[in-house]
């Protein structure tokens, strides 16, 4: 990792990155079949036009307020703060409609799909939260939705499968590949290639071919804008540390972006350390990965010496992915964001601590951010820490029951 380069941050904040080829430095781009290029180029043109159009922005803003429930609260976590020796604030994306940050992006893209005149929407999901958000958003705008989900995730996130179906979506169980999020994205891309003119691919994270990493970040940046304004109003200052979990990276990039131009604010992304550093035991892409191409974009990937994508593991389905958004890889390289990893057990401990001290059951994804923040607080007391609470933990109750049963505790 290099030292922070002001030029890289200036280019991001001025809108010069991604560049005209969709690259953030050495990362990003478009690595897709030629049949998809017209759809990709049209999506970029129309997305830029829509996001610059006051009428579209007003429609999106109205829906975010009246249907999603924005702005989400900023909660002072007093008991966690007392335990950690810090001032702790939680940005409550768990309180959005459907229970996670995913709805911000899903709603914006569903509105775009309707604007483009698409006949149907396909999406992928890991933990199920993006699938639920896509299903709800498509129901809201009146478009049929099909969601690809790995068979492993279908079983460990059964409540979200039921929610998607109740919201009118068709859930397609993927038995190929690793049967998790990577396989679900593979199948969604195949579907899109088969009908690029009539199908809209509603991608759920800041990954994939350009313009998706940029588009998802723009739709999720509302998180950081709100949190920055709320904290300044409540405390009169900026945080010392901002922490978010990172799988593909959409909630983290949405939270971080409002603080990129503030050198006094340290930004920390927390990946899934799983069971350890061995191959196949974690999903810590930035910590252990190398550059490569996956799902239409060049970024950091978990791969072997032959360039084959490695199996991953995390107790959290939403972080169980062998890649990361290209903007995160770029921010790592220029030194603006620091990335670390948290193992399964430490994440579970942080989930229990938050639940018992604050009366908030966070998602397992968020528990990684909480554990990372707790570790940072232990190294230096008295800091103001802002944590992106990306989602609620209702969806994880089955996994939590299994872990308790394995450990010999009452389920």
Image (tube, helix red, strand yellow):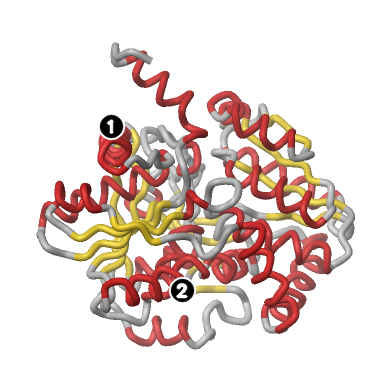
Give me the disc on residue 297: none
In this picture, residue 280 sits left or right of residue 339: right
Mark 1 or 2, nearer chain start: 2
Q: Which residue is at the front of the view, 51 or 24?
A: 51
Q: Which residue is mark 2?
A: 225
Residue 73: % across, % down: 44, 60
Q: Quadrant of the C terminus?
A: top left
Q: Which residue is at the front of the view, 224 or 20?
A: 224
Element carrying mark 2: helix
Residue 402: % across, % down: 41, 19
Residue 221: % across, % down: 51, 69
Q: Quadrant of the N terminus?
A: bottom left
Q: Residues within 10 Å of mark 1 (few under 14, many from 20)?
A: some
Q: Quadrant of residue 107?
A: bottom right
Q: Which residue is mark 1?
A: 345
Q: In this rendering, is residue 319 above or below 257?
A: above
Element carrying mark 1: helix
Q: Quadrant of residue 30?
A: bottom right
Residue 175: % across, % down: 66, 27
Q: In this rendering, is residue 315 above or below 294?
A: above
The residue shown at (65%, 62%) is 66
- Would you say residue 277 is visible in this rendering? no
Q: Quadrant of residue 23?
A: bottom right
The residue shown at (61%, 28%) is 154
């Amino acid at each position: 990792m290099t030292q922070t380069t002001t030029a890289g941050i200036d280019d991001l904040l001025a809108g010069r990155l991604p560049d005209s080829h969709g690259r953030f430095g050495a990362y990003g781009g478009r690595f897709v079949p030629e049949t998809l290029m017209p759809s990709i180029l049209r999506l970029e043109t129309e997305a830029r036009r829509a996001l610059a159009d006051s009428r579209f922005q007003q429609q999106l803003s109205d829906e975010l307020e009246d249907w999603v429930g924005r702005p989400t609260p900023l909660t002072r976590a007093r008991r966690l703060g007392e335990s950690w020796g810090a001032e702790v604030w939680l940005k409550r994306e768990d309180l959005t409609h459907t229970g996670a940050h995913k709805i911000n992006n899903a709603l914006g893209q569903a509105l775009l799909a309707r604007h483009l005149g698409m006949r149907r929407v396909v999406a992928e999901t890991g933990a199920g939260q993006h699938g639920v958000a896509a299903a709800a958003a498509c129901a809201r705008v009146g478009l049929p939705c099909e969601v690809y989900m790995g068979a492993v995730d279908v079983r460990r996130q059964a409540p979200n499968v039921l929610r998607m179906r109740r919201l009118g979506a068709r859930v397609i169980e993927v038995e190929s590949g690793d049967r998790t999020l990577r396989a679900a994205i593979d199948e969604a891309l195949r579907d899109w290639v088969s009908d690029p003119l009539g199908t809209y691919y509603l991608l759920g994270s800041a990954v994939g071919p350009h313009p998706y990493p940029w588009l998802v970040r723009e739709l999720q940046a509302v998180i950081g804008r709100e949190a920055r304004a709320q904290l300044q109003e409540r405390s009169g200052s900026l945080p010392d540390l901002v922490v978010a979990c990172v799988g593909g990276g959409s909630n983290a990039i949405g939270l971080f972006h409002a603080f990129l131009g503030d050198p006094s604010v340290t930004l920390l992304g927390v990946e899934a350390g799983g069971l350890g550093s061995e191959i196949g035991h974690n999903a810590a892409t930035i910590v252990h990965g190398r550059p490569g191409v996956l799902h239409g974009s060049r970024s950091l990937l978990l791969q072997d010496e032959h360039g084959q994508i490695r199996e991953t593991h995390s107790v959290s389905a939403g972080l169980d992915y062998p890649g990361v958004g290209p903007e995160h890889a770029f921010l790592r390289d220029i030194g603006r964001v620091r990335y670390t990893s948290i193992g399964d057990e430490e994440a579970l401990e942080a989930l229990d601590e938050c639940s018992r001290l604050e009366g908030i059951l966070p998602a397992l994804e968020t528990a990684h951010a909480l554990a990372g923040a707790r570790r940072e607080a232990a190294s230096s007391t008295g800091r103001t820490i802002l944590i992106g609470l990306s989602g609620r933990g209702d969806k994880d109750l089955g996994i939590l029951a299994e872990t308790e049963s394995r450990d010999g505790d009452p389920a």
